Amino acid sequence: MELTYTIRGADGNEYGPATLEQVTAWAHEGRVQPQQEVRRSDMEYWSPAGSFAELQPAFASRAAVAAPITTAPIMPPRDPATEAQLKSGASWFYWIAGLSLINSIVAFTGSNWRFMLGLGVTQLFDAFGNELGGAGKVVVLTLDLIAAGVLVGFGVFAHKRHLWAFVVGMVLIALDGLIFLLAQDWLGVGFHGFILYCLFRGAKACRELKAA
């Protein structure tokens, strides 16, 4: 099996896996510097790129034809369209969290109206809280805040190109959609399907950017 390399950029994000030919080309172009952390697929730890014997010729040849580079390491350029697709998908975590939280606050005040777009689990919490009343509503509102906070966390990590945030988020949204399916709330089911599609596109863009 061909060895691959994952590179930790100056922005803290990880790029790869990439083949030796790709990493060598990046080194020749100055996009990978000797001091940058690299992990080869047969290693469990990170090591400076300059410590890999197979990459040293690329660094040596570049040093021979160019002055020492003092600027921050440059990683492969980002495709604007793919980057926008990732951010669009990741932003849906914020939208769902915001709409769900508004629904919960409205329910806490005793009002009957709500947005049709939001989490089903928080709506279940709200219905249960209305039956408890008083302190029960406060407990339920706290649970709603935690649920919204989890989604915001997914959004933050997704924007930072963590693919797992998209994947786990999609699983949770799909499970939440089952609540609407059981209740035969087809508008809610359709909304969840649309969100899953948007998150899938974001995950696809994330994977493409990490492999670039």
Image: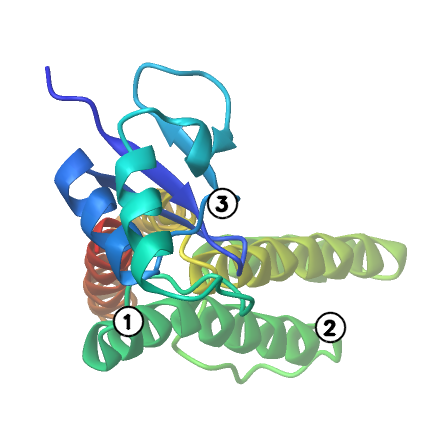
Residue density around tag 2, few if under 14, some if 14–19, many if 20 or more, within 10 Å: many
State if disc 1 and disc 3 touch (CB < 8 Å): no
Q: Name the residue beneath numbered marker 3.
A: 36
Instruction: Identify which residue, 13 or 21, lies in the foreground.
Output: 21
Identify the residue at horizontal 36%, vertical 50% (top origin): 179
Q: Which mark is residue 108?
A: 2
Task: Between label 2 and label 3, give the one nearer the viewer.
Answer: 3
Q: Name the residue beneath numbered marker 1.
A: 78
Q: CA distance from mark 2 to mark 3?
A: 51 Å
Q: Is residue 152 above or below residue 32?
A: below
State if disc 3 and disc 2 touch (CB < 8 Å): no
Q: Secondary structure at mark 1?
A: loop
Q: Amino acid at mark 2?
A: Phe
Tell me if I can see residue 204 in this picture: yes
Q: Is residue 83 above or below residue 10?
A: below
Position of 129 with respect to 64 (left or right) is right
Residue density around tag 1, few if under 14, some if 14–19, many if 20 or more, within 10 Å: few
Instruction: Identify which residue, 138 or 20, lies in the foreground.
Output: 20
Q: The N terminus is located in which quarter?
A: top left
Q: Amino acid at mark 1?
A: Arg
Q: Secondary structure at mark 3?
A: loop
Instruction: Identify which residue, 141 or 194, lies in the foreground.
Output: 194
